[in-house]
Image (cartoon, rainbow, N blue to C red):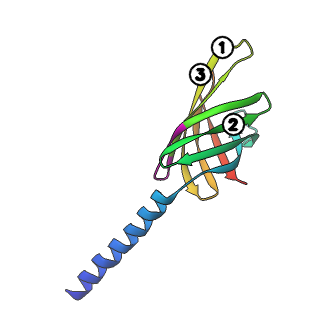
Amino acid sequence: MKSNLLVIVLLGLLLGTVGVWASAVNISGTWDRSVDTGDGRGLHPDGTFVFKQAGEKLTGTLSVSQGERIVTGTVKGDKVEFIIESKDDRGEPFKVPFTGTIESPTKISGTAGDAKGKGTFKWTATKK
């Protein structure tokens, strides 16, 4: 009986600790992004995120060789979802949806749609 109670208490403490980590995640800061475009070259550097998180709300920018893009989205537990907004060479607006998992305080990875809506690619971000 006492051992069952001890197991329940320890399990509760463990789950509580995991919940605190997940709710305490804040990805604000500068992150190097790498992408895998599926062309066999694997992950390669392709930009820098600057995230600003307030509660679950996420804003920021993505700086790439073509310019700066706007980031808006959410962080819920260890999951992140955001959209990159910009304009193409003709001035037409486009949006790219990103989803990911916060694997550690310094690593996020996930998938994103391409700007033309013709597929997805894998991405990883490492905190500077």
What is the secondary structure assignment of the residue under circle 3? loop
Ranked by sequence position, the earlier of labels 1 and 3 is: 1
**Magenta-span inclusion, residue 106:** no
Label 3, residues with CA under 10 Å away: few <14, some 14-19, many ≥20: few
User: From mark 2 to mark 3, how far is it between C-alphas?
Assistant: 21 Å
User: From mark 1 to mark 2, how far is it between C-alphas?
Assistant: 18 Å
Q: Which mark is residue 118?
A: 3
Examine the rendered structure and indicate whether residue 38 appears above or below residue 102.
above
The residues colored magenta run: 73-79
Q: Residue at x 63, y 17 (%)?
A: 93
Q: Residue at x 47, y 58 (%)?
A: 22
Marks 1 & 3, CB-CB < 8 Å contact: no
| Residue that label 1 marks | 92
Picture quadrant where residue 61 is located: top right
Picture quadrant where residue 18 is located: bottom left
| Residue that label 2 marks | 62
* Residue type, mark 1 in image: Glu
Instruction: Give the x, y percent position of residue 104.
Output: 58, 59
Label 2, residues with CA under 10 Å away: few <14, some 14-19, many ≥20: many
Ranked by sequence position, the earlier of labels 1 and 2 is: 2
What is the secondary structure assignment of the residue under circle 2? strand
Examine the rendered structure and indicate whether residue 113 appears above or below residue 76.
above
Between tags 1 and 3, which lies in front?
1
Examine the rendered structure and indicate whether residue 41 appears above or below residue 86.
below
What is the total number of numbered labels drawn onto the structure image?
3
